[in-house]
Image: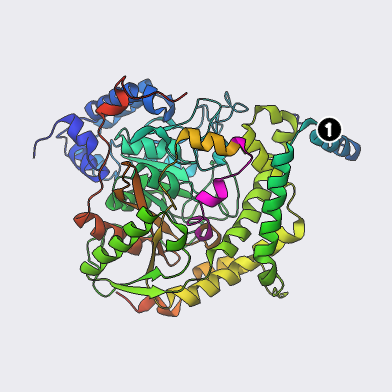
Amino acid sequence: MDPKPESGADVVRNYVAFWQQISISGEGAAAMARELRAYAAATEDVRATLSPTDQPANFARALTAEWPSDKVSP
Amino acid sequence: VSRTVEEVLDGSLVEQVSRLQSGELAVRDLIEAALTRAERLQPALNCFIMLDRDGALARARALDALPSDRRRKMPLFGAPVAHKDLFAREGRIVTYASRLYAEHRASITATAVKRFDDAGAVDLGTLNLTEFACGPYGLNILVGNTRNPWNLEHVAGGSSSGSAAALAARLVAASMGTDTGGSIRGPSSACGVFGLLPTNGRISRHGVLPLSHSLDNVGVLARSARDIACVLGVVAGEDANDGASSREPVPDYESGISAGLGGLRIGQPVNYYSEHADAAIAAMVAETARVLADLGATIVPLEVPDPRRLDALANILVVAEGSAYHREDIRRHADLYTPAVRDRILFGFSIDAVSYIDALRLRGRELQSYMDAVFTKVDALLVPAMPRAAPRHAEVEAALSGASDLSFSIGKFTRSFNYLGLPALAVPHGRTTLGLPIAFQLVGRPFQEALILRIAYCFEQVVPPRFPPLASPAEPAVPEIA
């Protein structure tokens, strides 16, 4: 690892060099594009219903909520 | 009952600890037997990355010197264990199964490893995995792939491949793995052992290499539900070093495990799962439901939310977070990554920020919807663990060279529960006509691991798991994998 902080120009230069260094085959890129489209399509409807109050923290709250059914079975 | 050391090694963790605590068997003798067996089978199975013979025997001698009262306070006293090589132990090389970190020495000890140590376990070494825990087949260019103890031509699953193979071969009594989309439950199913994905945050991840910090969980693999209950009681609980670890109290997972299934409602989905599983898997789940009903549970057929949308949301998180974590390493050392792993990480750079943020924001609402739709009607859910038995190494290599990432399809029954954060336990049940193990999953409400362990415990009393004969992996006649 290089501990030296990078300047903004370094970051851009390295990012370009990174993509030049990596060769993704045509098939690989196509497979990724297919996956990406599939993700977008699979979640499009539900994402459209998000409200401003839907936040990541709601997940932690839902995990620790006491569900009414918790006490139904032994 | 008097048993040989080899027979004790074949037995459960709970039995091993009982015989060691009583002094009936010396820790050194059991560990020597485990190491000898591991050295014999390692060339065939390739489940270890590093075996620490000297360290394990020194530890065994120290434990043998402890007085009886100290032994009985250690719930894992003398048990041979080893963990996926993602768990740091200070001063020891932790490779993450990567060429990039082949000589990386850890500067800390993972909290969960320390809890194993404090409970008296004996760490035999480090176990193989998919490079950086990134993929379901145990592919590895540092030390080679793990092979399935049931058939060496087949993969052991992944990413916790070495953990599952070492347990099936009775080299260790318990192991920790990690599960981001099925990396414990998949190999557990492939090798025929029990594997628990706990509730999100139940076990500290401090000192464990991340793949996706939102979805990663440390979990436990063992040869019985009771063994998992014992180990979970040791490792679960809050850790100041992992801000995402849960403050929920840790119950005694073993008490009540044999209470039976009377009055319990177990949901069996009527949609999605059976139509996306091999016929043998669907038949196994149906048979499981019959057994559970015979044991007193009420099987409730029900429609569950389609897991494909949850999978899609999980995939956004796992590839984006994985790419963020690996960004610098892959930019500087892309040539040191396995191509299939590298491609998955590169894929994550294509995820836009808006999709990623939405996937996080939806998580709480999706969990609430799932609880309302499922867990207001049932106490646990019964679904298959994997859609098929373990594929052959050659099949996986061919699929990957065709730029088809099978990792998302093989995890289609597991990944949604990582997104929801729910506990899920893989339970082995039977084998295919090719002799390969298959398994079902029991999914519970948040922090109700005790309930799904109880169901699994009752099930295994009437359908005990079977493990592969140990002679075959070492026999030269068994075909070698190129």
Where residue B450 appears, x then y in whole percent?
34, 61
Residue B270 sits in which quadrant? bottom left
Question: Which residue extends farthest right?
Answer: A9
Q: In this view, does B267 lie to the left or right of B13?
A: right
Quadrant of the rendered image containing residue B222: top left
Residue B122 seen in this snapshot? no
Identified at 76% across, 33% down, the residue is A22
Check disc 1 and give the amino acid type: Ala
Q: Position of residue B232 (x, y in %)?
A: 37, 51
Queried whether the magenta region covers residue B410, the answer comes back as yes
Query: In what element is the residue under mark 1?
Result: helix
Residue B398 drawn above or below residue B53: below
Left or right side of B238 for B408? right
- Residue B194 percent coordinates (x, y): 34, 49
Whole-percent x, y for residue B320 in the image = 68, 50
Task: Using the image as rendered, state which of residue B47 and residue B26 is in the foreground.
Answer: B47
Crowding at dot 1, Cα within 10 Å, few <14 / some 14-19 / many 20+, comes out as: few
Q: Mark 1 points at which residue?
A: A17
Range shown magenta: B401-417
Magenta stretch containing residue B143, yes or no? no
> What residue is rendered at 26% in x and 30% in y?
B470
